[in-house]
Image (cartoon, rainbow, N blue to C red):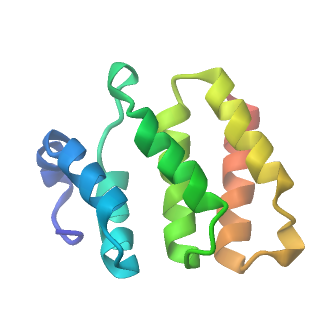
Amino acid sequence: MTHWSKTADAWLTERQNTLIDEAMRTKSTTKKRLILNLLERTTFEQDQIRTDFLDFCFNLILSDEPVGVKTLAIKLTYAQSAHYPELRDELYTALQMMEPEMLPAALRHIRGKMLKNNKNT
């Protein structure tokens, strides 16, 4: 499903809650990464943000999960908090606390990109 065309994004959005439930339930890192990748293609509406999934993503950012999972968690946290300045500020603070010189290149890049995005909003 990760190779579907962009027209499938609406179909994925319709199944967003099912995907979220599975991402939070699975013990498989590979499955989690693939589901988070699919969720990145969905739209997070302001009135349908799931706080349990938002907390899950924040926890993934600070976890010992692989870099791919963490970068997707950062992107998904940003997508969900886009409607709420106080949540964006919380993400901004968490990203600022990460020391760039201690991060792998992918995390350093997404951290810088999200910090820049936060300044522009």
**Front position in the image: 16 or 112:** 16
Q: Quadrant of residue 91?
A: top right
Residue plotted at (35% across, 64% down): 37
Residue plotted at (24% across, 69% down): 2
> Is 118 drawn above or below residue 41 in the view shown?
above
**Front position in the image: 56 or 35:** 56
For the N terminus, the quadrant is bottom left
The reply, left or right, for residue 10 in relation to residue 110 is: left
Q: Quadrant of residue 98?
A: bottom right
Query: Residue 34 at what x, y percent from top left?
Result: 31, 71
Residue plotted at (18% across, 49% down): 18
The reply, left or right, for residue 73 in relation to residue 18 is: right
Query: Residue 111 at what x, y percent from top left?
Result: 71, 58
**Front position in the image: 63 or 101:** 63
The reply, left or right, for residue 83 in relation to residue 64 is: left
Q: How many marks?
A: 0
Query: Residue 47 at what x, y percent from top left?
Result: 35, 19
Residue plotted at (74% across, 68% down): 108
Query: Residue 104 at what x, y percent from top left?
Result: 72, 80
Q: Residue furthest top?
A: 47
Q: Quadrant of residue 121?
A: top right
> Is 91 drawn above or below residue 107 in the view shown?
above
> Is 66 drawn above or below residue 115 in the view shown?
below
